[in-house]
Amino acid sequence: MQVALTGLSQSGKSTLFRAITEGHVHSDAGVTHHADKAIVKVPDERVDRLAAIYKPKKHTYATIEFLDLPGLSFVDEPSRQEARRTVAQARQAAMLVVIVRAFQNDSVASYRNRIDPARDLEELNTELVLADLELVLNRIERLEKQIQKPIKSVDQDKHELALMQRCSQALENMRPLREIIQNEEEEKVVRSFGFLTLKPRRVVVNTNEDRLSAACPLTAEQAGGETFLLSSKLEAELAELDAAEREEFLKDMGVKEIARDRLIQMCYRTLNLISFLTVGEDEVRAWTIPGGCHAVDAAGEIHSDIQRGFIRAETVHYDDFMASGDMKGAKAAGKVRLEGKTYPVRDGDIINFRFNV
Ligand SMILES: Nc1nc2c(ncn2[C@@H]2O[C@H](COP(=O)(O)OP(=O)(O)OP(=O)(O)O)[C@@H](O)[C@H]2O)c(=O)[nH]1
Ligand SMILES: [Mg+2]
């Protein structure tokens, strides 16, 4: 699962990427038109606390991948062409994080010579809509030809054509496809196109570090949902410190918490991913599964043998485990249950699979 960082040029994407990846350096430092990606651990206090209890040889976090895309500019035709190519790289991503500039910094040229988060976001939204519209119109043209031919897929093609026509109407009215594609069946038809306005997304407003407690310059309505206010520069600096230095620094700055961890966790949730946990002396580990995943499929995440030979999932929720202090206590309190194959695993379930192969 991949999250793409995107936005207009010089909005602070790569700085945020550095913070998220804790200092990952661009493999092609200095080359601006270069996308970079990195696998990132999803911070999880539950893993930390279970590791403190079990003292395992290793502990392992869930991960997601972040992609740092070059900045987009639409100020003239050559940059527009370039931006279209860049944005195509986001089509494979499962989610977009849009970074909007609100920070003042005289040494960094501002987009269209003015710092204006609302205008920037609107321009970006329009361009994403246009990029999708281009794909939709191309597809419509092909389908219109195709349905003239006496081929087997004609009914299916007609069905797709009707859907694409609805999509093009919506896009022409500047509505994202997110608002149009309503059910899983429709989603399946359009999935392979990687429409940008269909992807879940969050807006990050990148502001100066001394303006973090000020009101966010974008309303939730303008952003199409809750925004994330942070300072990329501060986050990147914090990422370079060790835990003790970091705490000191935050206290000095009067900042409550670092945004990085919250941002990564938010992406994980937006992707509809949850974690179940396994514990033991060898390893404490968070495993990634889609929300609603059944116990037997969760088992397959660990090993296909465990899935095949599944008997029961011995399950206790992390909160109940912690309330009881340890596994013995949780068992004594009747909090450890034996669940069957179709049990929908909850985020934070600690599971020991019983299996037989
Ligand atoms: N003051 C301040 N400067 C920032 C902040 N974030 C980024 N900058 C500066 O803005 C410039 C651009 O930052 P980048 O992170 O490279 O921006 P980008 O969006 O990756 O740029 P492109 O990939 O070229 O579009 C750099 O000089 C950063 O130091 C911030 O939060 N505060
Ligand atoms: Mg960059």
Image: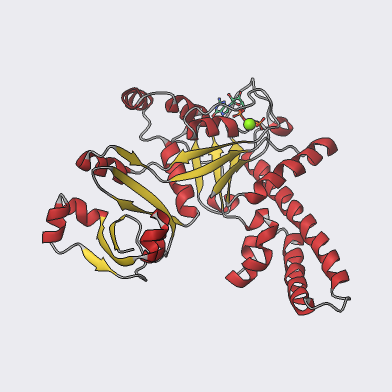
Residue placed most toward the observer, 93 or 308 = 308
Which image quarter has ligand 1? top right
- Report the front residue among 128 and 186: 186
Above or below, 145 relative to 91: below
Horizontal placement of 265 versus 190: left or right? left
- Quadrant where the C terminus sits is bottom left
Is residue 251 visible in the rendered image? The answer is: yes
Q: Is residue 253 depicted above or below 215 in this figure?
A: above
Q: Residue at x 75, y 40 (%)?
A: 83
Q: Residue at x 66, y 22 (%)?
A: 30
| Residue 232 in the image, given as x and y percentages of width and height | 52, 31
In-front residue for pair 29/96 = 29
Residue 234 in the image, given as x and y percentages of width and height: 47, 27
Horizontal side of 107 relative to 112 (left or right) equals left
- Please tell me which residue is depicted at 58% across the width and 54% down the height of the picture: 224
The reply, left or right, for residue 298 in relation to residue 19 is left
